[in-house]
Amino acid sequence: MKKRILLSIVLLLPLFQVLAAAQQREANRQNTTKVLTPNTERGIYEGHKNYGKSIAVFGGSLSVLKESEAAKQIWADQLHSTVTTYGVGGAGFSRLQGHSLQQQVREAGIHDIYVLWASTNDFTNNRAIGSWSDYTAEDNYNEEHLDTQCGGINYCIKTLLEKNPAAEIYFFTSFRFFAREAGYNPFSSEGNASGHNFSEYVQAQKECCSHFSIPILDQFELLGANIYNFELYYLKDKLHLKEEGYRKIGPVQAAFLADGK
């Protein structure tokens, strides 16, 4: 009898381990979801289209790190809005890339404004760029294309509008990064394993949004970081922003979010 009990325990251990790992992943996901509320009685964008509306943010680590709250608190205060972050570090648009934005939008609640904040992860992990037509009516919603950055972007747009057809969807492009030349130089001949430099991923982001008339904030250009000044705004990894970087871009983001332009 004791042998049977021991055998049963041994056989069940892998199942318990899988369940425990799944529970831990869910706990980690929930811990990244944070809501910021206004610290002011009125915001400077009172009277603008999106004043007082709820905002949800999806992305990788650049959208979720503690430092990013410096920017998102600016949105909350100036727009008098609640800001809910669903982002997860390591995420990309490709369904192969971490707790992807595809997963994040499926798990999200109903909000007035959805912000798709592009990361560097699809590029650094060599996910295929794809094409603006990936996972659209053009390819009959081919699910194989959910592996690409573009397929993931198009999936997110479609899923969010099915969740809330009246929602505004806005897109923040990736920032430049300075850990390698291909990350900041749009003319770089250095590519990742898929043969593309980072600016080509950013250009593809814009093409997907153009297809669906999604307003774009071109953070690749508008942060104003370059090889001479990036240390003011970036952490030592030359990839993630300091609070100073978020404080620089935060008012630009808030102005964009006020009217979507």
Image (cartoon, rainbow, N blue to C red):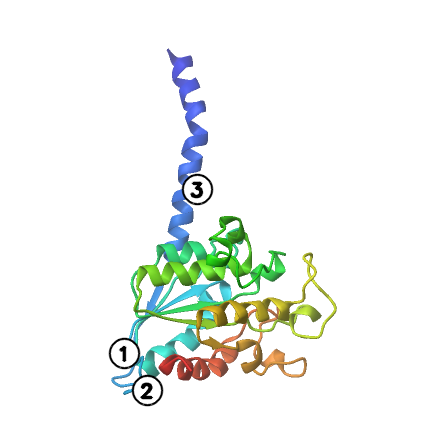
Q: Can the viewer see residue 17?
A: yes
202 vs 88, left or right, is right
Pick the front one: 209 or 251: 209
Which mark is nearer the camera, 2 or 3? Answer: 2
Disc 3: which residue: 21
The local secondary structure at tag 3 comes to helix
Q: Tag 2 or tag 1, which sits nearer the N-term? A: 2
Residue 177 at x, y = what percent?
61, 71
Quick check: marks 1 and 2 in contact, CB under 8 Å? no
Real-space Cα distance between discs 3 and 1? 39 Å
Residue 238 higher or lower than 260, as above or below: above
Split into 4 quadrants, where in the image is the N terminus?
Answer: top left
Residue 149 at x, y = what percent?
54, 59
Quick check: marks 2 and 3 in contact, CB under 8 Å? no
Which residue is situated farthest in the top direction here?
1
Disc 2: which residue: 45
